Image (cartoon, helix red, strand yellow):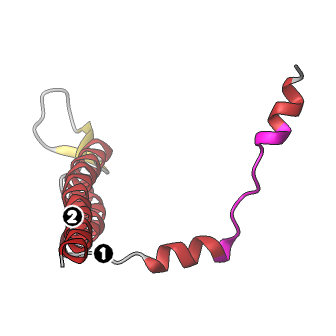
């Protein structure tokens, strides 16, 4: 038993770009999936805007000062907004995918019954 022969038998060609684009174009998205993609784009830009808006204090003018001498971009807030936005988008997209699958099942059942 030669493992290299097994690997060469199981090896497949990578899909071509045209095959991938044709498969993506054949899919239709419902409202929930489009809303989830839009929400992901909005969360991306909101993360950048809020990271700049709520900047962190890099250095204060003296030790117990409440004023900042130098502020810097808030990466942790940006990453937090990105993660929460992507999780919410993923959840809504999954609900949309479940609805799409159920509607396909309903169409096949109605063809079968009628």
Eyeballing the image, is 26 above or below 15?
below
Q: Residue furthest top?
A: 1
- 1 in magenta: no
Instruction: Determine which residue is flagged by label 1.
Output: 29
Q: Are marks 1 and 2 in contact (CB under 8 Å)?
A: yes
Residue 95 drawn at (x, y percent): 19, 57
Task: Depth check: give the residue in front, 43 or 16.
Answer: 16
Q: Report the side of 2 relative to 76 (left or right).
A: right
Task: Depth check: give the residue in front, 54 or 82.
Answer: 82
Start-end of magenta stretch: 8-18
Residue 45 drawn at (x, y percent): 29, 66
Instruction: Determine which residue is flagged by label 2.
Output: 96
Q: Which mark identifies residue 99?
A: none
Q: Residue at x 20, y 63 (%)?
A: 102
Q: Quadrant of the C terminus?
A: bottom left
Which of pointers 1 and 2 lies earlier in the amino acid sequence? 1
| Residue 65 figure quarter | top left
Residue 106 drawn at (x, y percent): 19, 69
């Amino acid at each position: 038993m030669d493992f290299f022969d097994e690997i060469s038998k199981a090896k497949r060609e990578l899909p071509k770009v045209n095959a991938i684009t044709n498969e993506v174009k054949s899919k239709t998205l419902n409202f929930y999936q489009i809303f989830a993609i839009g929400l992901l784009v909005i969360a991306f830009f909101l993360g950048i805007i809020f990271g700049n808006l709520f900047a962190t204090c890099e250095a204060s003018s003296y030790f117990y000062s409440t004023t900042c001498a130098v502020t810097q971009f808030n990466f942790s807030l940006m990453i937090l907004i990105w993660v929460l936005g992507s999780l919410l988008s993923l959840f809504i997209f999954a609900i949309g995918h479940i609805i799409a699958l159920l509607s396909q099942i309903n169409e096949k059942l109605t063809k079968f019954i009628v």
